[in-house]
C-alpha cells in the first residue's frame, strides 16, 4: 500500500511533464487513472473489485438506456432503485447472512446514483466511457469521498491535465499528506486504543474514564475522517487537481446546522440535492420542512449502520436540527438589538461547547453495540466514582517514542507520570481541533521554507515508522 502512491505519482508526473501532445497525454493519463485506481482498490481483496466491476457494468447499461432518450424517467428510477437495493442487500446481509461488506460500496454507489440522475436531468452534456470510469474509480475519493458531482470533477481533472506542472503544489501536497497521516496514524489510532477498552469494559469504568471514553471517540472520529480527507486532498494537490472541501473544522461549529455545513460536507450536499429537495425541501410549509429534515437524518442514520443505535443517532441530529431551525426562525421575526462583542463571543463559545457535547453524546450511540450499552456509559459518567485510571485505559497513549523521553525527565518522580501521555494527547487534540487552522487551508497559505520542510519530514517519518499497526479508516465501514 505504501509503495503504490510514489509509483503512481512518478508515472503521473512523467506523463504530465514529458508528453507534449495534449490528446496523447490525456489518453495516457486516463488509462493511468483507471488502471492505477483498479490496482489500488484491488489491494483490499479482489472480491471487492469483482463487486465494483459488476456495479459499473450494471450502471453502464442503465446509462446507455437513458441515452436512447426513450422512457428516460423509468430507466433513471430503475437505476436508482437497483443501486439502492444492492447497497441495502450488502448492508443487511452482513448481519443476517454473514456475508462480507464490499469496501466503500456506499460511496461508489452514491456516485453511480449521482451520475444517473444528473444524466437524466441533462446536467451531463456528453457521455464518455473513460470519463465515467475515472469518475467512479478515482482512487483518492473512492473510499470515503468527497461525493463530487461529475461535471465539477471532470472539469477540474481536465484542467489539471492542461495546466503546467506546479512544483510548489507538489511540496504543499506533501505537507498536507504528512499532516493527514499524522492525524490518522498517531492521533486517531492512539485514541482508538482507549476507546476500544472503554466500550468493552463499560460496567467497570470510573466517572472520568466514562467521560473520556466518549470524548476520545469523538476525537478519534474527527482525526480519522479529517486525516483521510487531508490525504485525499494532498494526493490531488500533488497532481494539480483540487477536490471539493469535505471537512472544515466541524467541532468549531456554533450549532448543529453549522456542524453539518462542516462535517462530511459533500454527503450533506448529496442528501440535499437528491433527497431533501425532491421531497419538497422548504418549499411546502414549515411542517413539511421539518418532516423532510427529520427524514434526511433518519436516512443518514440508516445509511451509516443497520442497528437501532444508528437510528437513535440520526433521530438525535434530526431533532436538534429542527429545534435549531425553529429558534432561528423565531429570532428572525423578533426585534433585533445590537450585541456587544463580549456577549457575541460568549454566545459563540457557549454554542460551540453545547454543540460539541451534544454531538459527542450522539457519537456514543454511534459507537456502542447497543442502546443499553450507550445508556450505561452515560450512567457511569455520574455514578462511576472517582478513582485512578485502569492501566489498560492509559497505557495506549504511552507511545515508545514519547515514553522514552518522559523517562529521562523528573516527571517520573510523580505519581501522575503514568497518565501524563493521556493528558498530553487530550490537550494536543483539543488544541488542534478547537484552535488549529484547517489543514487544507494551512497547506495552501503557509510559506514553504525550512520550517515547513522539517515539519513535513518529521510527520512523514513518524507516521511511516508507526504504520505497521494502523487500522482501516472508520468511514470505510459505512
Image (cartoon, grey):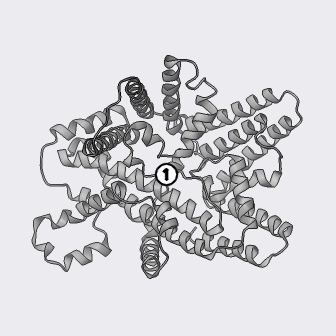
x and y percentages locating residue 62 in the rendered image: 80, 37
**What residue is pinned by disc 1?**
247
Q: Residue furthest toward the bottom? A: 450
Report the residue at 81% width, 40% height from top.
Answer: 63
Q: Is 452 situated left or right of 274 in this image?
A: left
Q: Residues within 10 Å of mark 1 (few under 14, many from 20)?
A: many
Q: Would you place residue 16 above or below residue 117 in this image?
A: below
Comparing 6 with 446, the one in front is 446
Q: Is 111 situated left or right of 253 in this image?
A: right
x and y percentages locating residue 377 in the rendered image: 26, 39
x and y percentages locating residue 141 in the rendered image: 61, 54
Comparing 295 with 173, the one in front is 173
Comparing 448 with 293, the one in front is 448
x and y percentages locating residue 148 in the rendered image: 64, 48
In which quadrant of the rendered view does residue 380 lie? top left
Q: Quadrant of the N terminus?
A: bottom right
Q: Is 101 situated left or right of 209 in this image?
A: right
Amino acid at each position: 500500500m505504501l509503495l503504490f502512491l510514489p509509483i503512481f505519482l512518478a508515472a503521473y508526473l512523467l506523463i504530465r511533464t514529458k508528453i507534449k501532445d495534449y490528446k496523447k497525454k490525456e489518453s495516457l493519463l486516463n488509462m493511468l487513472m483507471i488502471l492505477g485506481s483498479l490496482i489500488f482498490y484491488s489491494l483490499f481483496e479482489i472480491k471487492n473489485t469483482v463487486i465494483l466491476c459488476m456495479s459499473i457494468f450494471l450502471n453502464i447499461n442503465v446509462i446507455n438506456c437513458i441515452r436512447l432518450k426513450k422512457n428516460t424517467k423509468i430507466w433513471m428510477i430503475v437505476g436508482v432503485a437497483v443501486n439502492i437495493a444492492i447497497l441495502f442487500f450488502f448492508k443487511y446481509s452482513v448481519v443476517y447472512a454473514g456475508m462480507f461488506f464490499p469496501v466503500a460500496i456506499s460511496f461508489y454507489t452514491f456516485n453511480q446514483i449521482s451520475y444517473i440522475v444528473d444524466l437524466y436531468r441533462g446536467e451531463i452534456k456528453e457521455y464518455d466511457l473513460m470519463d465515467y470510469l475515472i469518475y467512479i474509480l478515482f482512487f483518492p475519493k473512492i473510499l470515503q469521498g468527497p461525493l463530487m458531482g461529475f461535471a465539477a470533477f471532470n472539469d477540474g481533472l481536465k484542467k489539471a491535465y492542461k495546466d503546467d506542472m506546479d512544483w510548489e503544489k507538489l511540496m504543499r501536497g506533501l505537507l498536507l499528506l504528512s499532516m493527514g497521516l499524522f492525524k490518522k496514524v498517531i492521533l486517531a489510532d492512539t485514541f482508538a486504543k482507549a476507546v476500544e477498552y472503554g466500550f468493552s469494559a463499560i460496567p467497570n469504568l470510573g466517572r472520568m474514564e466514562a467521560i473520556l471514553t466518549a470524548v476520545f471517540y469523538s476525537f478519534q472520529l474527527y482525526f480519522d475522517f479529517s486525516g483521510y480527507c487531508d490525504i485525499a486532498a494532498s494526493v490531488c494537490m500533488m497532481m494539480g487537481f483540487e477536490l471539493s472541501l469535505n471537512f472544515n473544522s466541524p467541532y468549531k461549529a456554533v450549532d448543529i446546522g453549522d456542524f453539518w455545513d462542516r462535517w462530511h460536507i459533500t454527503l450533506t450536499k448529496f442528501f440535499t440535492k437528491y433527497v431533501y429537495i425532491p421531497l419538497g425541501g422548504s418549499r411546502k410549509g414549515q411542517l413539511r420542512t421539518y418532516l423532510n429534515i427529520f427524514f434526511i437524518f433518519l436516512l443518514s442514520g440508516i445509511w451509516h449502520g443497520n442497528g437501532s443505535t444508528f437510528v437513535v443517532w440520526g433521530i438525535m441530529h434530526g431533532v436538534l436540527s429542527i429545534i435549531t431551525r425553529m429558534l432561528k426562525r423565531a429570532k428572525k421575526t423578533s426585534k433585533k438589538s445590537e450585541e456587544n462583542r463580549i456577549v457575541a463571543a460568549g454566545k459563540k463559545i457557549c454554542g460551540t461547547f453545547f454543540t460539541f457535547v451534544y454531538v459527542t453524546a450522539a457519537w456514543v450511540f454511534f459507537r456502542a453495540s447497543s442502546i443499553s450499552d450507550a445508556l450505561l456509559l452515560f450512567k457511569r459518567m455520574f455514578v462511576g466514582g472517582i478513582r485512578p485510571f485502569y492501566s489498560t485505559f492509559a497505557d495506549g497513549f504511552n507511545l515508545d517514542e514519547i515514553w522514552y523521553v518522559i523517562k529521562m525527565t523528573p516527571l517520573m518522580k510523580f505519581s501522575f507520570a503514568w497518565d501524563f501521555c493521556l493528558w498530553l494527547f487530550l490537550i494536543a487534540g483539543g488544541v488542534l481541533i478547537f484552535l488549529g487552522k484547517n489543514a487544507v487551508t494551512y497547506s495552501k497559505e503557509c510559506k514553504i521554507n525550512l520550517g515547513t520542510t522539517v515539519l513535513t519530514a518529521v510527520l512523514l517519518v513518524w507516521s511511516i515508522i508507526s504504520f505497521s499497526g494502523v487500522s482501516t479508516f472508520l468511514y470505510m465501514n459505512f
